[in-house]
Every structure is written in structure tokens, then in C-alpha cells.
Image (spheres, rainbow, N blue to C red):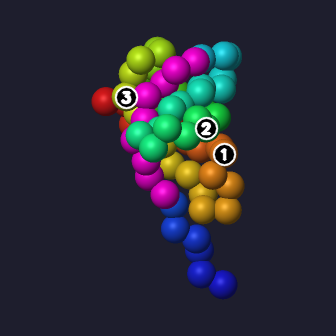
């Protein structure tokens, strides 16, 4: 069975609670996202209003992982 492809979408952080970030994507959908290990390891801060790139699985489009902060 082939490994599924990930979907990368850009959005804006609108709310932060502990480890969960609410991100409004460019197509006006709000998803819950967490931070990837590389961002956490390098202690990059993500605040409301920041533009980020979110990686999502095609099977669950309500959750994602924040890969980059712009």
C-alpha cells in the first residue's frame, strides 16, 4: 500500500491554547494544529497573527502540523 501524500496549506494563527493552535487557512477553514518537532526543538515562538504553513493528512482535514512560520 502506498504512503499517502500530505497536503500543505498556508494560513494565519488566530488563537493559541497551550499546545494547540487554531489556524484559519486561506480558504477560510479553521483547523486545529500542533507544532512540529523542529520548531519546538529550536524554540521558535508562534503568536496570533503569524503566517504559517500547515501540513495535513488527506484523511483528516481538521487537524494539522505547523511546519514553517513566515
Marks 3 and 2, the one that precedes in the sequence: 2
User: Which secondary structure lies at badge 1?
Assistant: strand
Q: Which residues are magenta?
A: 7-15
User: Which secondary structure lies at badge 2?
Assistant: strand
Category of crowding for the residue at label 2, using alpha-carbon neighbours closer than 10 angstroms: few (below 14), some (14–19), many (at least 20): many
- Magenta stretch, main secondary structure, is strand
Q: Residue lying farthest left?
A: 70
Q: Which residue is mark 1?
A: 62
Q: CA distance from mark 1 to mark 2?
A: 5 Å
Q: Which residue is mark 2?
A: 31
Residue 19 is tagged as none
Lateral position of residue 14 relative to residue 19, left or right: left
Percent coordinates x, y for residue 18 in the rendering: 67, 16
Lateral position of residue 37 relative to residue 52, left or right: right
The residue at 59%/26% (across/down) is 21
Percent coordinates x, y for residue 67 in the rendering: 45, 40
The residue at 60%/62% (across/down) is 58
Q: Is residue 67 visible?
A: no
Residue 51 is tagged as 3
Q: CA distance from mark 3 to mark 1?
A: 18 Å
Image-quadrant location for residue 1: bottom right
Q: Decide whether residue 58 is among the magenta residues.
A: no
Percent coordinates x, y for residue 49 in the rendering: 41, 17
Image-quadrant location for residue 53: top left
Percent coordinates x, y for residue 47 in the rendering: 46, 15
Cβ atoms at labels 1 and 2 below 8 Å apart: yes
Amino acid at each position: 500500500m502506498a504512503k499517502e501524500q500530505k497536503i500543505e496549506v498556508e494560513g494565519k494563527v488566530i488563537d493559541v491554547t497551550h499546545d494547540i493552535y487554531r489556524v484559519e487557512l486561506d480558504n477560510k477553514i479553521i483547523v486545529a494544529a500542533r507544532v512540529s518537532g523542529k520548531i519546538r526543538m529550536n524554540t521558535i515562538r508562534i503568536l496570533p497573527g503569524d503566517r504559517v504553513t500547515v501540513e495535513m493528512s488527506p484523511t483528516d482535514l481538521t487537524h494539522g502540523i505547523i511546519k514553517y512560520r513566515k
